[in-house]
Amino acid sequence: MTGIAWWAHDGLEMIRRNLIHIRRTPELLLDVTLSPIMFVLLFSIVFGGAIRVGGAGGQSESYTNFLMAGIFVQTVAFAGMYTGVLLANDLQKGMIDRFRSLPMAQSSVLTGRTLTDVMRAALAVAIMWIVGLAVGFRPEGGLAGNLAGIGIILLFGFALSWVGVAAGAAVRTPEALQGIMFAVVFPLTFVSSAFVPVASMPEWIQPFAENQPMTVVVNAVRDLTLGLNVGTYTQPAILWCVGILLVAFPLGLWLYNRRTTQ
Amino acid sequence: MSRLMIEAEGLHKYFGETKALVGLDLDVQEGTILGVLGPNGAGKTTAVRILTTLTHPTKGKARVAGIDVLKHPDQVRANIGVAGQYAALDEILTGRENLTMIGRLYRLDRATVRQRADDLLEHFELTDAAGRTVKTYSGGMRRRLDLAAALMPQPPVVFLDEPTTGLDPKGRLSMWDLIAGLAKGGTTVLMTTQYLEEADRLADDILVIDHGKGIARGTADELKRQVGGERLEVTISEAPDLDAARRVLEAMGEGPARVNTEDRRVSVAVTSHGAVLTRAIRELDGAGVGVDDIGFRRPTLDEVFLTLTGRPAEEKPAEVAE
């Protein structure tokens, strides 16, 4: 087999391990099942009547339509960062030393981890989609638009998984990382177009809210799934995802290697 | 013709100000067991981590199975098995799943993986537990599974870092049998240990290290001879007879006798067995000294370590973290 075939072989082996972990400890899936369901229900029911979103809510101008893109992106963002927690866990135990002593592609520990988390994110998206439909989500963007939207959600999740890898390799304990995660991801989500239109925010914060990656990705997903001004945000969203990957991927590998060769 | 399967030359490893290794040399002949003996913090684990490609030395070079550890770490990894005090297993996977995963990552084909996992589980008495998650395993079972995982590729060279630390006597004995079996099958083993008894029992050759470098090398017998020869040791029945016993033994041995009042033991260095034993019994009897036990004994490795380093082997210096 060639180098790339072996790399895929090792990566699949690592994915298999991660899937067994999920099967044996289903609570590992709570963050991508229960939490998003709660978010969809709470936000659409509680805020649905109070927030006017106008045309950004699709033909029906409904808040639920507006909200779903935000919930999708927030969920994969948390799931991506959670990669770091799982990696930091592994790093605290002896298992990584075992992997390091094996003639395997060392990066497959990380690619296996991030690809598994893309699967987790896909599961979360599927669950939210169904719950969303039940409370009035009407994705009118057509099959192509919706598939493209899902593609961007997962690409963003994958990119953030690598940010998670870098963070997981940099911190000393998984607990520390959880704290940092909330301190970073929460403000980024709330100061974005995820839950309310940016135009409703104080003026001084709007330039940031309008241009940060979360908003760009949320807008792209929203437009694609709802069939609105398609195209305006698609390219910038993909560029953001690729840009994050270009930085986080080598940084994650480097930090991981540095951490494990000490 | 035997060849060297592990060679290290002038290994240095610094962690900031801490010098874990300062010029360690070692070599191991094919099919033999080298016991690396030293207290906590002597640099044993660091040496193993360098030889198993887990960390880079600050200075120095090493070859395992004839392959340069720094230049071709991947080829080295394909030729070694590593097991240690911190059993590197996945707790959520079952015993068999651990072996299968590790076998696959050694890039063995499925049939081979299945066959070897079955054989090793059987040989290591883990067949009944094979379907249980490692979380439920005892310390001894974890160590056995850890060693089994290291043996999946049938590696020519095996590294064992304190393989029995923390095990109960039964677990220790069963690990010893497995380790001894390895060398019989032609595997080269480097084993670190804090237990002198373990090195004495298993190792063909012992390297004593302290403060990051080797301070003595040889077979257990050679090391013991370095410290001094045999002694005739007598345990007497009644404490008041200690003086009389000492006079008798000093008259027939070399140098002053050592007296241990608490255990009522008197010993003296002797140069030959000859008629010493019968003469000692007769003369002690003649002096009216009751004898509980008498015999020749050679120094233990504990005494060797004490002589070489000036402190007991089990001492744990706090300033050097390993």
Image: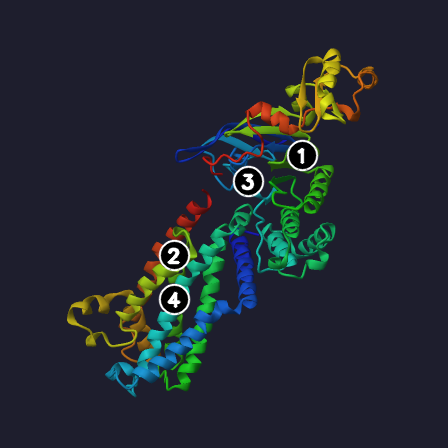
The residue to which callout 3 is attached is B52
The quarter of the picture where the N terminus of chain B appears is: top right
Label 1: chain? B
Can residue A160 be spotted in the picture?
yes
The residue to which callout 4 is attached is A78
Residue A145 is situated, as x and y percent measured from the top left of the image, at 36, 77
Residue A78 is situated, as x and y percent measured from the top left of the image, at 38, 66
**Residue at the bottom extreme of this rendering:** A60
- Establish whether labels 2 and 3 are both on one chain: no
Q: Residue B197 bears which disc, if any?
A: 1
Tell me the quarter of the picture where residue B7 sits: top right
Q: Residue A176 bears which disc, if any?
A: 2
Q: Residue B96 bears which disc, if any?
A: none
Kindly check if marks 2 and 3 are in contact, taking CB atoms under 8 A apart as contact: no
**Residue at the front extreme of this rendering:** B240
Q: Nearer the viewer, residue A126 or B314?
A: B314
Mark-to-mark CA distance, 2 and 3: 31 Å
Counting the numbered discs, the total is 4
Mark-to-mark CA distance, 1 and 4: 53 Å
Tell me the quarter of the picture where residue B4 sits: top right
- Looking at the rendered image, the disc whose residue lies closer to the viewer, 4 or 2, is 2
For label 4, the crowd category at 10 Å Cα-Cα, with few meaning under 14, some 14 to 19 and many 20 or more, is: many
Q: Which mark is first along the chain, 2 or 4? A: 4
- In the displayed structure, B252 sits above or below B186; it is above
Disc 4 is placed on an element classified as helix
Residue at the spot 37% in from the left edge and 62% down from the top edge:
A160
Disc 1 is placed on an element classified as helix
Q: Which mark is first along the chain, 3 or 1? A: 3
